[in-house]
Image (cartoon, rainbow, N blue to C red):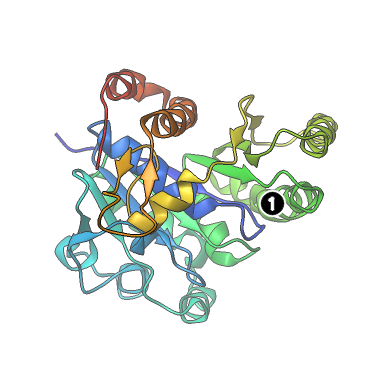
Amino acid sequence: MKKNATVITIADTKGGSTKSTTAVNIAAFIAHSGLKTLLLDFDLEQPTACSYFPLQKEAPYGVYEFLIMHETDLDKLISETTTQKLDVMSSNSVRQEIVSHLNASADGIIRLKSCLKLLKSEYDVIVIDTVGTIDPTVNMAVLASDVVLSPLDPSMPGVREYLRGTISNLFRSLIPFTDYGIELPLVYTFFNRVEENNDCRRIKELFNQQIKSLPPLPFQITVLDKDIKKKNSYKVAASLGIAAFQHYTEPTNKVAHPYKITKAQAQSIKDDIYYLCQHLLPGYKSQFDAFMKTEIAH
Protein backbone atom coordinates (compact mmCIF):
# COMPACT_ATOMS: atom_id res chain seq x y z
CA MET A 1 0.00 0.00 0.00
CA LYS A 2 1.33 3.42 -0.95
CA LYS A 3 2.13 5.84 1.82
CA ASN A 4 1.15 9.49 2.10
CA ALA A 5 3.81 11.19 4.17
CA THR A 6 3.14 13.94 6.65
CA VAL A 7 5.54 16.80 5.93
CA ILE A 8 7.08 18.64 8.88
CA THR A 9 9.12 21.78 8.23
CA ILE A 10 11.46 23.14 10.89
CA ALA A 11 11.44 26.89 10.29
CA ASP A 12 12.44 30.08 12.06
CA THR A 13 13.92 33.15 10.40
CA LYS A 14 16.55 33.56 13.12
CA GLY A 15 19.81 31.72 12.60
CA GLY A 16 21.25 29.65 15.42
CA SER A 17 17.92 28.61 16.92
CA THR A 18 18.86 24.89 16.70
CA LYS A 19 16.63 24.07 13.74
CA SER A 20 19.04 21.45 12.41
CA THR A 21 19.53 19.86 15.84
CA THR A 22 15.76 19.72 16.25
CA ALA A 23 15.26 18.31 12.75
CA VAL A 24 17.77 15.47 13.05
CA ASN A 25 16.62 14.35 16.48
CA ILE A 26 12.94 14.43 15.57
CA ALA A 27 13.64 12.52 12.36
CA ALA A 28 15.69 9.93 14.24
CA PHE A 29 13.00 9.51 16.90
CA ILE A 30 10.33 8.97 14.25
CA ALA A 31 12.50 6.44 12.41
CA HIS A 32 13.30 4.56 15.63
CA SER A 33 9.54 4.38 16.19
CA GLY A 34 9.30 2.24 13.07
CA LEU A 35 8.15 4.87 10.58
CA LYS A 36 9.95 5.30 7.27
CA THR A 37 11.39 8.79 7.47
CA LEU A 38 13.13 11.17 5.08
CA LEU A 39 15.26 14.04 6.36
CA LEU A 40 15.40 16.67 3.61
CA ASP A 41 18.20 19.19 4.09
CA PHE A 42 16.83 22.41 2.61
CA ASP A 43 19.35 24.68 4.30
CA LEU A 44 21.26 25.75 1.21
CA GLU A 45 23.59 28.13 3.06
CA GLN A 46 24.89 26.07 5.96
CA PRO A 47 23.72 22.49 5.36
CA THR A 48 24.07 20.42 8.50
CA ALA A 49 21.28 17.88 8.65
CA CYS A 50 22.47 15.82 5.68
CA SER A 51 25.93 15.34 7.19
CA TYR A 52 24.84 14.63 10.77
CA PHE A 53 24.37 10.85 10.59
CA PRO A 54 26.84 8.37 9.07
CA LEU A 55 25.71 7.07 5.68
CA GLN A 56 25.70 3.49 4.52
CA LYS A 57 24.82 4.56 0.99
CA GLU A 58 25.49 8.02 -0.44
CA ALA A 59 23.43 9.14 -3.42
CA PRO A 60 25.18 11.17 -6.15
CA TYR A 61 22.35 13.71 -6.42
CA GLY A 62 20.37 15.86 -4.02
CA VAL A 63 18.09 18.87 -3.72
CA TYR A 64 19.35 20.61 -6.88
CA GLU A 65 18.63 17.67 -9.18
CA PHE A 66 15.32 17.00 -7.41
CA LEU A 67 13.99 20.55 -7.74
CA ILE A 68 15.70 21.96 -10.82
CA MET A 69 16.51 18.96 -13.01
CA HIS A 70 13.28 17.10 -12.14
CA GLU A 71 15.20 13.93 -11.32
CA THR A 72 12.83 11.13 -10.26
CA ASP A 73 15.23 8.21 -9.74
CA LEU A 74 15.20 7.83 -5.96
CA ASP A 75 18.35 5.71 -6.01
CA LYS A 76 20.19 8.77 -7.31
CA LEU A 77 18.50 11.21 -4.93
CA ILE A 78 18.21 9.45 -1.58
CA SER A 79 21.06 8.55 0.75
CA GLU A 80 20.62 5.90 3.42
CA THR A 81 21.84 6.49 6.97
CA THR A 82 23.04 3.77 9.31
CA THR A 83 19.83 4.33 11.29
CA GLN A 84 17.17 1.92 10.09
CA LYS A 85 14.26 3.59 8.27
CA LEU A 86 16.02 6.99 8.16
CA ASP A 87 17.04 8.38 4.76
CA VAL A 88 18.34 11.81 3.80
CA MET A 89 18.37 14.05 0.75
CA SER A 90 21.42 16.26 0.72
CA SER A 91 21.67 19.98 0.20
CA ASN A 92 24.10 20.00 -2.70
CA SER A 93 23.71 23.41 -4.31
CA VAL A 94 24.62 27.02 -3.73
CA ARG A 95 21.43 28.72 -2.55
CA GLN A 96 21.51 31.43 -5.20
CA GLU A 97 21.57 28.86 -8.01
CA ILE A 98 18.28 27.34 -6.91
CA VAL A 99 16.68 30.69 -6.05
CA SER A 100 17.60 32.12 -9.48
CA HIS A 101 16.08 29.13 -11.26
CA LEU A 102 12.91 29.23 -9.20
CA ASN A 103 12.44 33.00 -9.51
CA ALA A 104 12.42 32.53 -13.27
CA SER A 105 9.85 29.72 -13.11
CA ALA A 106 6.09 30.11 -13.07
CA ASP A 107 5.75 27.44 -10.38
CA GLY A 108 8.76 28.64 -8.39
CA ILE A 109 7.47 28.93 -4.85
CA ILE A 110 5.20 25.88 -5.09
CA ARG A 111 7.75 23.68 -6.89
CA LEU A 112 8.69 21.76 -3.75
CA LYS A 113 5.05 21.06 -2.90
CA SER A 114 4.58 19.55 -6.33
CA CYS A 115 7.86 17.60 -6.33
CA LEU A 116 7.19 16.09 -2.91
CA LYS A 117 4.33 14.03 -4.36
CA LEU A 118 7.00 11.62 -5.62
CA LEU A 119 8.45 11.21 -2.12
CA LYS A 120 5.24 11.26 -0.10
CA SER A 121 4.19 7.93 -1.55
CA GLU A 122 7.43 6.34 -0.28
CA TYR A 123 7.62 7.67 3.29
CA ASP A 124 5.51 7.97 6.41
CA VAL A 125 7.09 11.26 7.45
CA ILE A 126 9.28 13.85 5.73
CA VAL A 127 11.20 16.30 7.93
CA ILE A 128 12.55 19.43 6.20
CA ASP A 129 15.35 21.51 7.68
CA THR A 130 15.56 25.13 6.48
CA VAL A 131 17.90 28.11 6.52
CA GLY A 132 17.55 30.64 9.34
CA THR A 133 16.58 33.73 7.37
CA ILE A 134 13.78 35.19 5.27
CA ASP A 135 14.27 33.38 2.00
CA PRO A 136 12.22 31.99 -0.92
CA THR A 137 13.39 28.47 -0.07
CA VAL A 138 11.88 28.79 3.41
CA ASN A 139 8.59 30.04 1.95
CA MET A 140 8.65 27.07 -0.39
CA ALA A 141 9.23 24.58 2.43
CA VAL A 142 6.45 26.05 4.58
CA LEU A 143 3.95 25.93 1.72
CA ALA A 144 4.88 22.30 1.10
CA SER A 145 4.34 21.24 4.71
CA ASP A 146 1.47 19.98 6.81
CA VAL A 147 3.03 21.15 10.07
CA VAL A 148 5.67 23.75 10.92
CA LEU A 149 7.76 23.54 14.08
CA SER A 150 9.67 26.64 15.20
CA PRO A 151 12.34 26.37 17.89
CA LEU A 152 12.40 29.70 19.68
CA ASP A 153 15.58 31.14 21.14
CA PRO A 154 14.83 32.30 24.72
CA SER A 155 16.30 35.75 24.25
CA MET A 156 14.80 39.15 23.55
CA PRO A 157 16.33 39.29 20.05
CA GLY A 158 15.02 35.77 19.42
CA VAL A 159 11.48 36.73 20.44
CA ARG A 160 11.55 39.94 18.41
CA GLU A 161 12.81 38.14 15.33
CA TYR A 162 10.15 35.45 15.65
CA LEU A 163 7.38 38.05 15.88
CA ARG A 164 8.84 40.31 13.19
CA GLY A 165 10.52 37.85 10.85
CA THR A 166 8.83 34.48 11.21
CA ILE A 167 5.24 35.61 11.84
CA SER A 168 4.98 39.04 10.20
CA ASN A 169 7.30 38.51 7.24
CA LEU A 170 7.31 34.75 6.60
CA PHE A 171 3.90 33.41 7.58
CA ARG A 172 1.89 36.51 6.65
CA SER A 173 3.53 36.66 3.22
CA LEU A 174 2.03 33.25 2.43
CA ILE A 175 -1.57 34.19 3.21
CA PRO A 176 -2.40 35.15 -0.44
CA PHE A 177 -1.78 31.53 -1.47
CA THR A 178 -4.92 30.51 0.40
CA ASP A 179 -6.88 32.24 -2.38
CA TYR A 180 -5.56 29.55 -4.72
CA GLY A 181 -6.64 26.64 -2.55
CA ILE A 182 -3.34 26.07 -0.74
CA GLU A 183 -3.87 25.42 2.95
CA LEU A 184 -1.35 26.93 5.32
CA PRO A 185 0.15 24.47 7.80
CA LEU A 186 -0.40 24.23 11.52
CA VAL A 187 2.37 26.06 13.36
CA TYR A 188 3.87 24.95 16.66
CA THR A 189 6.55 26.87 18.49
CA PHE A 190 8.47 26.10 21.66
CA PHE A 191 11.23 27.62 23.73
CA ASN A 192 14.49 25.75 23.24
CA ARG A 193 17.74 25.76 25.24
CA VAL A 194 15.91 27.25 28.21
CA GLU A 195 17.86 28.03 31.37
CA GLU A 196 16.40 28.42 34.85
CA ASN A 197 16.78 32.15 35.35
CA ASN A 198 14.58 35.24 35.59
CA ASP A 199 15.58 36.48 32.15
CA CYS A 200 14.13 33.38 30.46
CA ARG A 201 10.98 33.58 32.59
CA ARG A 202 10.35 37.24 31.74
CA ILE A 203 11.00 36.67 28.04
CA LYS A 204 8.50 33.79 27.99
CA GLU A 205 5.86 35.91 29.72
CA LEU A 206 6.37 38.76 27.26
CA PHE A 207 6.21 36.43 24.27
CA ASN A 208 2.99 34.78 25.41
CA GLN A 209 1.40 38.19 25.97
CA GLN A 210 2.39 39.38 22.51
CA ILE A 211 1.22 36.19 20.80
CA LYS A 212 -2.21 36.56 22.43
CA SER A 213 -2.45 40.18 21.27
CA LEU A 214 -1.82 39.37 17.60
CA PRO A 215 -4.65 40.16 15.18
CA PRO A 216 -6.56 37.13 13.83
CA LEU A 217 -4.53 34.98 11.44
CA PRO A 218 -5.74 32.44 8.84
CA PHE A 219 -3.44 29.85 10.36
CA GLN A 220 -3.08 28.46 13.84
CA ILE A 221 -0.02 29.15 16.00
CA THR A 222 0.29 27.00 19.11
CA VAL A 223 2.90 27.76 21.75
CA LEU A 224 3.77 24.45 23.39
CA ASP A 225 3.73 24.41 27.18
CA LYS A 226 6.88 22.40 27.72
CA ASP A 227 10.25 24.13 27.49
CA ILE A 228 13.22 22.21 26.15
CA LYS A 229 16.07 22.76 28.58
CA LYS A 230 19.62 23.51 27.54
CA LYS A 231 21.57 20.23 27.59
CA ASN A 232 25.17 19.50 26.67
CA SER A 233 24.22 16.02 25.43
CA TYR A 234 23.05 17.54 22.14
CA LYS A 235 26.61 18.71 21.41
CA VAL A 236 28.09 15.36 22.42
CA ALA A 237 25.61 13.50 20.21
CA ALA A 238 26.40 15.76 17.25
CA SER A 239 30.12 15.02 17.64
CA LEU A 240 29.33 11.30 17.67
CA GLY A 241 26.80 11.44 14.82
CA ILE A 242 24.07 9.82 16.90
CA ALA A 243 20.66 10.88 18.16
CA ALA A 244 20.85 12.73 21.47
CA PHE A 245 18.42 10.24 23.06
CA GLN A 246 20.94 7.40 22.70
CA HIS A 247 23.13 6.73 25.70
CA TYR A 248 26.80 6.30 24.98
CA THR A 249 29.88 5.55 27.03
CA GLU A 250 33.34 5.68 25.53
CA PRO A 251 36.03 3.52 27.16
CA THR A 252 38.19 5.75 29.34
CA ASN A 253 41.33 3.76 28.55
CA LYS A 254 41.19 4.67 24.85
CA VAL A 255 40.98 8.46 24.85
CA ALA A 256 41.97 11.23 27.24
CA HIS A 257 38.60 12.98 27.10
CA PRO A 258 35.92 10.33 26.54
CA TYR A 259 32.43 11.16 25.33
CA LYS A 260 29.52 10.15 27.50
CA ILE A 261 25.74 10.42 27.41
CA THR A 262 24.30 8.77 30.50
CA LYS A 263 21.07 6.79 30.48
CA ALA A 264 19.39 9.54 32.50
CA GLN A 265 20.56 12.24 30.08
CA ALA A 266 19.42 10.22 27.08
CA GLN A 267 16.04 9.51 28.65
CA SER A 268 15.51 13.18 29.46
CA ILE A 269 16.05 14.13 25.82
CA LYS A 270 13.92 11.22 24.66
CA ASP A 271 11.07 12.56 26.81
CA ASP A 272 11.48 15.99 25.20
CA ILE A 273 11.45 14.66 21.64
CA TYR A 274 8.48 12.43 22.42
CA TYR A 275 6.58 15.47 23.66
CA LEU A 276 7.25 17.32 20.41
CA CYS A 277 6.47 14.36 18.16
CA GLN A 278 3.15 13.52 19.77
CA HIS A 279 2.00 17.08 19.05
CA LEU A 280 3.31 17.07 15.50
CA LEU A 281 2.08 13.58 14.64
CA PRO A 282 -0.77 12.61 16.99
CA GLY A 283 -1.81 9.80 14.65
CA TYR A 284 1.41 7.93 15.41
CA LYS A 285 1.20 8.19 19.19
CA SER A 286 0.95 4.41 19.63
CA GLN A 287 4.23 3.91 17.73
CA PHE A 288 5.90 6.61 19.81
CA ASP A 289 4.57 5.07 23.03
CA ALA A 290 6.02 1.70 22.04
CA PHE A 291 9.41 3.25 21.29
CA MET A 292 9.44 5.01 24.66
CA LYS A 293 9.44 1.58 26.31
CA THR A 294 12.69 0.63 24.60
CA GLU A 295 16.25 1.64 25.37
CA ILE A 296 18.65 2.77 22.65
CA ALA A 297 22.39 2.55 23.17
CA HIS A 298 25.19 3.15 20.73
The number of numbered badges drawn on the structure is 1
Q: Position of residue 272 (x, y in %)?
A: 49, 30
Residue 224, quarter of the rendered image: top right
Drawn side of residue 14 relative to residue 281, left or right: right
Q: Position of residue 212 (x, y in %)?
A: 81, 29
Q: Is residue 220 visible?
A: yes
Drawn side of residue 124 relative to residue 56, left or right: right
Figure check: 234 above or below 99: above
Drawn side of residue 132 relative to residue 37, left or right: right
Quadrant of the drawing holding the C terminus: top left
Q: Secondary structure at mark 1?
A: helix
Quadrant of the drawing holding the N terminus: top left
What's the residue at 80%, 50% (across, down)? 160
Q: Position of residue 133 (x, y in %)?
A: 64, 63
Q: Is residue 4 visible?
A: no
What's the residue at 60%, 61% (across, down)? 132
Q: Nearer the viewer, residue 36 or 145?
A: 36
What's the residue at 55%, 59% (across, down)? 138
List the single residue furthest toward the front. 253
Q: Nearer the viewer, residue 265 or 214?
A: 265
Q: Position of residue 30 (x, y in %)?
A: 33, 36
Figure check: 151 above or below 73: above
Circle 1 crowding by C-alpha within 10 Å: few under 14, some 14–19, many from 20: many
Residue 226, quarter of the rendered image: top right
Q: In this figure, which residue is indicated by the disc labeled 1?
A: 166
Amino acid found under the numbered disc labelled 1: Thr
